[in-house]
Image (cartoon, helix red, strand yellow):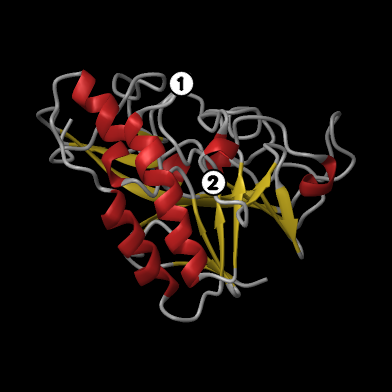
Amino acid sequence: MEMQPVHGIPALRADEYLVVGDLHIGIESHLRSKGFHLTSHTEEMFDTIIQAADGSASKLIVLGDVKDSVPGSTKQEYREIPAFFDRLLERFDSVDVVRGNHDTSIEEFLPGHVRIRPASGMKVENVGFVHGHTWPSKEVMASETLVMAHDHPAIMFRDGVGRQVNEPCWVRGKFRDTASEKYDVLPKNFIIIPAFNRMLGGSPVNIAGEPLLGPIMGGDLLDLENATVHLLDGLDLGKLSGLTIAGGGRQRWGRRIKTNNIE
């Protein structure tokens, strides 16, 4: 399966599949409770998916976190998620959702023709797809390449006066070994996709001493030091090891919201 990021859009093309992750539909309701009054960006996300499909992708895979609220759900999620996926089913021959950690009771929101895959992932040909917050199945880990979301990867740039800017990015690399204590077979390659919802901004992957999230990305199975980093416009930033900066900005468990993209 040939895989290529869509230029300028946090979406992955894999033959006839379009792959996105971390929609977080309903995030505006969360922000409203914090005093930020923003209009919904769900329609904009739908238009961007259609743009990324470019008339040729016939199948869609969503790598988890369709909804934002956890625990519980909001009126915005009940209002927008069913209609969003009804329209996607009109455009794509199939829509698969791999369950993410925010997708509690997601069955209540999705039309019946959407296939809900377990958090342990799904496999298409030689590629495995997971959200990334829990261990994949052995079948998925026997793939040649593992595609993950969950971490909302971004690169933090910091200038001499301490001004910080985060840019969403792609992280691509290799597994360190061919097997582990938990898995008889490991994938050869991995891809971490940026969050599709631009309101999330992103969490820097280049902060020294700050691990990524999830058992695969946050463990020692990935050769992150030699992983390559690309921005959404395709700019190759080189190896992750050459982009590391001192800590003090990751806030992995906090909510990072993109306003003007300046921290």
Contact, CB < 8 Å: mark 1 with mark 2?
Answer: no
| Figure quadrant of the N terminus | bottom right
| Residue highlighted by disc 2 | 110
Residue type at mark 2?
Leu
Q: Position of residue 204 (x, y in %)?
A: 36, 34
Residue plotted at (36% across, 65% down): 234
| Figure quadrant of the C terminus | top left
Identify the element where label 2 is drawn: loop
Single out the residue that lies furthest toward the left: 161
Q: Residues within 10 Å of mark 1 (few under 14, many from 20)?
A: few
Q: Position of residue 186 (x, y in %)?
A: 79, 45
Left/right placement of residue 137 relative to residue 257 reads right
Q: Is residue 148 visible?
A: yes
Counting residues from the start of the chain, the first of labels 1 and 2 encountered is 1
Q: Is residue 9 above or below residue 193?
A: below
Q: Position of residue 10 (x, y in %)?
A: 39, 56
Left/right placement of residue 184 relative to residue 125 reads right
Residue plotted at (14% across, 20% down): 35
Q: Is residue 235 visible?
A: no
Q: Is residue 262 above or below residue 63?
A: above
| Residue highlighted by disc 1 | 72
Residue type at mark 1?
Gly
Left/right placement of residue 126 relative to residue 223 reads right
